[in-house]
Image: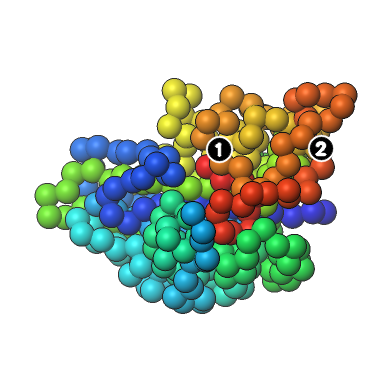
Amino acid sequence: MKNCLNSLICLLKKHLRTNNQTKVTEMKKVIKSFALKCAVVAHLVILSMVSGVFGQATVVNNNPNATQIAAGLNANGLVINNPQIVRGGNNNQIAIFSNGINGANLGVDAGVLFSTGHAVNELTKKNSSSSSSLQSSVSAQTGTYSDAQLTNITSNAIYDAVVYTFDITLTGGADALRIAYQFGSEEYPDYVGSVYNDTFGFFVRRKGTTGEWINMARLPNAAQTVTAINKVNFGKQGNNYSGTGNGYESSNSNHYERNGHTTATTSGNPNRLVLNNNPGPFPIHVEYNGLT
């Protein structure tokens, strides 16, 4: 079976600020201590947190441990404790990077990258064709893993998962936690509307409780739409669109950035794209065909 979540990029910013390439969700004045879980079943996630001509981003650490990841996320106004790589720690799936804005035109300059494929190659390649064999290698090592919160978004979110958890305490008078992210996928555009629905979740709950996890990885729209390729996309069905659409929505294209994939539609259906052949241009130097 094809890897159900074949590629993802997600960026969570590190300096309590944003820019025009990121979508921001904000929590204000509710609690001072949080337990957080980043759950991904897709190629790439970049994590960072807060209180032209392009080359590529710089890989700082291609196999960080949980403590090194936490150090890469820490910032003024917060303290990170109890970091744990629950799934996907030693299979080339995690890397710390810098130079993301000037080097690759990403929405985050420095952070931690999580991938269900080969993180370094997916960060440094520019829509090449090398990722398939690397993905197969990672899939053979990781297999399946079911995270209850992630599979609540889509039941197929069980392949090659990366799950990282940690606790945060706000300090120094900080009373808000802002999480900004950029999401991308190699499944764009061909698998939009299929069961291969790349998905990302960033789940938060009060520290020391067993209450409900709240997913902060949502679009900044009235519906607070979850982050998945069937929800945020170019606004056209993919060439491998299934009959049911698997929750497909076409109304969130204003949150989407095409990274080189085709825009041509089939002769029989103006709402369905032809098979992607990546005609370009490629404004963002990563492996992914589309991003938020």
Q: Is residue 76 above or below residue 157?
A: below
Q: Which residue is mark 1?
A: 256
Q: Is residue 199 above or below residue 97?
A: above
Say which quadrant the N terminus sits in: bottom right
Q: Nearer the viewer, residue 237 or 77?
A: 237
Q: Position of residue 284 (x, y in %)?
A: 55, 54
| Quadrant of residue 237 within the rendered picture | top right
Query: What amino acid is found at the position of numbered circle 2 in the picture?
Result: Val
Say which residue appears at 21% left-offset and 38% top-offset: 29
Neighbour tally class for label 1: few under 14, some 14-19, many 20 plus, Cα within 10 Å = some
Describe residue 164's horizontal placement relative to residue 263 as left or right. Answer: left
Say which residue appears at 44% left-offset and 23% top-offset: 222
Q: Position of residue 183 (x, y in %)?
A: 53, 47
Q: How many marks?
A: 2
Q: Please indicate, yes or no, whether residue 111 appears anywhere in the rendered image.
A: no
Describe residue 88's horizontal placement relative to residue 131 as left or right. Answer: left
Query: What amino acid is found at the position of numbered circle 1 in the picture?
Result: Tyr
Residue extending furthest toward the right: 268
Q: Nearer the viewer, residue 3 or 120?
A: 120
| Quadrant of residue 274 within the rendered picture | top right
Describe the element under mark 1 as helix, strand or loop.
Answer: loop
Describe the element under mark 2 as helix, strand or loop.
Answer: loop
Considering only order in the chain, which callout, 2 or 1, is on the residue closer to the N terminus?
1
